[in-house]
Amino acid sequence: MQNLLAEYHDKLSSNNYKLTSQRKDILTVLINNKDRHFSVEDLYNEVKKVNPDVGLATIYRNLELFCSLNITHMLEFESDYKHYELVSEDDHHHHLICMNCDKIIEFNDEDLVEFEERLAEEYDFDMVKHYIKFYGYCNSCQNSNEGEME
């Protein structure tokens, strides 16, 4: 965790931003929950456990800053909330989104990597980034009689 925090501190400093205590608290929560996709409200609630004085507007402002510095990226799923996760250079992944309970499952697939390479070659296209999302129903929702699936 300290290595990542130092990396983000350097990134902030090189862009003339300070690692304030509130930014450190937000980043610490994100680092300690790398596998989560936070809505702003969820992140706010988690950071409040560490720093009860943090405000919701502070979370919004810092997530916007972190996105602009490529520390986090915003994920727009077909829900009422935008979600955020840490950018990881060595862990490109895609998402399965349950349309009933909003569960988000990350996955990697070599076939998709090969498909991307084939597309780039076939269309002489230099891909910079992409996001793939599949919508459906998780195992729990498929096996549950609770709630109606679309």
Image: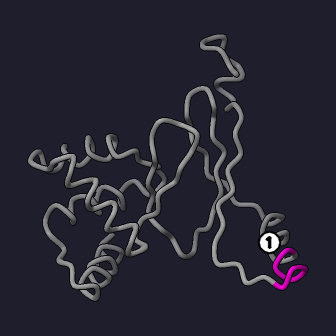
Q: How is the image coloured?
A: one colour
Measured as percent of width and height from the top left, residue 99 is found at 63, 31
- Give the amino acid type for the residue marked by disc 1 in the picture: Glu
Q: Quadrant of the N terminus?
A: bottom left
Q: Is residue 32 left or right of residue 18?
A: right
Q: Determine whether the residue tagged by mark 1 lies in a helix, strand or loop.
A: helix
Residue highlighted by disc 1: 116
Measured as percent of width and height from the top left, residue 96 is found at 66, 45
Towards the viewer: 5 or 38 = 38
Q: Identify the residue at the far right of this view.
A: 122
Residue at 64% in and 61% down? 131
- What residue is at 65 percent from the left and 23 percent from the top? 141
How far from the left and from the top, in percent, is residue 137?
A: 69, 31
First to last magenta residue range: 119-124
Relative to residue 65, is residue 141 drawn left or right?
right
Q: Nearer the viewer, residue 127 or 45?
A: 127
Q: How many marks?
A: 1
Magenta span includes 130: no
Q: Position of residue 30 (x, y in %)?
A: 35, 58
Q: Residue sitting at 70 percent across and 60 percent down? A: 108
Left or right: 119 with respect to 109? right
Tell which residue pokes out farthest to the top in this image: 145
Please tell me in which quadrant of the rendered image residue 2 appears.
Answer: bottom left
Within 10 Å of disc 1 (Cα), the crowding (few <14, some 14-19, many 20+) is some
Q: In the image shown, does 99 or 35 lie closer to the viewer?
A: 99
Q: Quadrant of residue 138?
A: top right
Prevailing secondary structure of the magenta residues? helix
Q: Quadrant of the C terminus?
A: top right
User: For the point 56% across and 28% down, which residue is it?
Assistant: 101
Could you say which is closer to the camera, residue 58 or residue 88?
Answer: 58
